[in-house]
Image (spheres, rainbow, N blue to C red):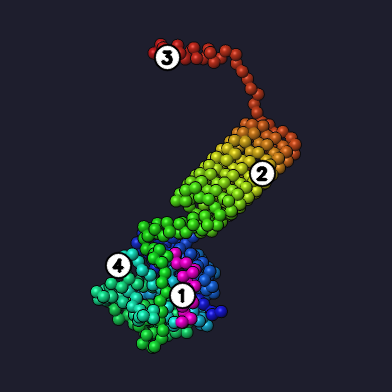
Amino acid sequence: MSKSAAIVLAAGLGTRMKSAKPKVMHPLAGRPMVNHVIANLQRASVEEVVCIVGPDMPELEQTVAPHKTAIQKDRLGTGHAVLAAKDVMRGDEENILIAFGDTPLITDQTFHAMLEARKRADVVVLGFRPENPGAYGRLIVDAQNELQAIVEFKDADAEQRAIALCNSGVMCVDGKKLFPLLERITNDNAAGEYYLTDIVTLARKDGLHCGVVEGEEDELLGVNSRVELARAEAIAQDRLRHHAMVNGATLLDPASTHFSFDTRLGRDVVVEPNVFFGPGVNVGDNVTIKAFSHLEDTQVGNGVVMGPYARLRPGTDLHDDVKVGNFVEIKKAVIEKGAKVNHLSYIGDARVGAQANIGAGTITCNYDGFFKYHTDIGAGAFIGSNTALVAPVKIGDNANVGAGSTISKDVEAGDLGLTRAPQKNFVGWSDKFRAKQALRKNSK
């Protein structure tokens, strides 16, 4: 297999984003845009990735790690940016893809098609046919689909502007020819910049073959503003919803379901409207997620029913056949097979044993303002409603805790734990009180 590498241009400041962080760091479906690009390149069997970053972008360098980075100290155009990668690359690459960190929707299939086309051409350019070609550069091709030139819109005549095939800027170039071509381009233009597209003209002069692969308009959306970021998010969400449904999940209202890039749903999962999946969620088979639930960094076993209005925070692990009801919040807790947490409860830093039942209004008091503490609830335990479990504390297997209790000491297996003040009834008190208050009210 040919050795393939990619150079991802990510040094832009993104001033139109009105943000202190680099443009390509803004998330799409729960992951920075640049990492979408890298992931799709890797799925296309690209072995080596080098990201071009600007100076003073340590956060971006950490985000793309362990991939190599090269710094473009002066932003002098796309050709200048690609040339910055020369000294950090291996030097034995047969194919080099050039992509952009702010164009996160290009699929691995499109990158793969470019690598395949590189077998027949020295330079391959990714083109597309937008509904409104506008000011995009035009790709001039002959009858054999050989790329003759890239003409910028401002330099194009009326006949060339009528061409529908536009330049995306993405290329795949013979690894042995890329840098020699880049070293020959000049900045003799109105902007005083070194344009990557100029290598097509140079390659044609050298008698090299230049070809075109066409992609879809949606996947070539470049993100330069938060408005465009929202458009990209909509496209990404549609793709993720489609993937979930064709793989066996039912989305009752797809448009109101929000996925992250790594959401995994099993077969026969039913997702009701207005459900949010943050990063790190894996859902088993035959699960029902009811409306307005929120999940992030959570494992959900087979046969689970949860919601509506359930919130599963990072570190939650629901085993098979668990029931999590309405207005329940769970964080960093294991809920074992068949256990139930049905109503208005908070379970954090805890284990709930198999077949245990957590009554309504139960909370684990896991934080003292400085440290978090663990609550362990045994298999088959029954926790009565409105119970506070003050961690660290252990409730044994098949133990009971009476409703309204505050439990700060362990309850052994099979025992009953109960803290409750004796009830006192005062005969006739309410009638006397009501009569007194009515008299006061009438006297005013």
> Where on the picture, by quarter, is residue 129?
bottom left
The disc label shown at residue 114, or none: 1
Mark 2 vs mark 3: in front: 2
Task: State the residue position of label 2.
Answer: 338
Q: Earlier in the sequence, mark 3 or mark 1?
A: 1
Q: Residues within 10 Å of mark 4 (few under 14, many from 20)?
A: few
Q: Real-space Cα distance between discs 3 and 4?
A: 77 Å
Residue type marked 1: Met
Residue visible at 63% across and 41% down in the picture: 340
Residue visible at 40% across and 63% down in the picture: 218
Q: Residue 240 at x, y = what percent? A: 49, 57
Task: Report the quarter where the C terminus lies.
Answer: top left
Q: Is residue 101 magenta?
A: no
The disc label shown at residue 134, or none: 4
Q: Real-space Cα distance between discs 4 and 1?
A: 25 Å
Q: Residue 179 at x, y = what percent? A: 43, 82
Residue type marked 2: Gly
Task: State the residue position of label 3.
Answer: 441
Q: Residues within 10 Å of mark 2 (few under 14, many from 20)?
A: many
Residue visible at 73% across and 41% down in the picture: 397
**Image: magenta residue range:** 104-120
Q: Earlier in the sequence, mark 3 or mark 4?
A: 4
Q: Earlier in the sequence, mark 4 or mark 1?
A: 1
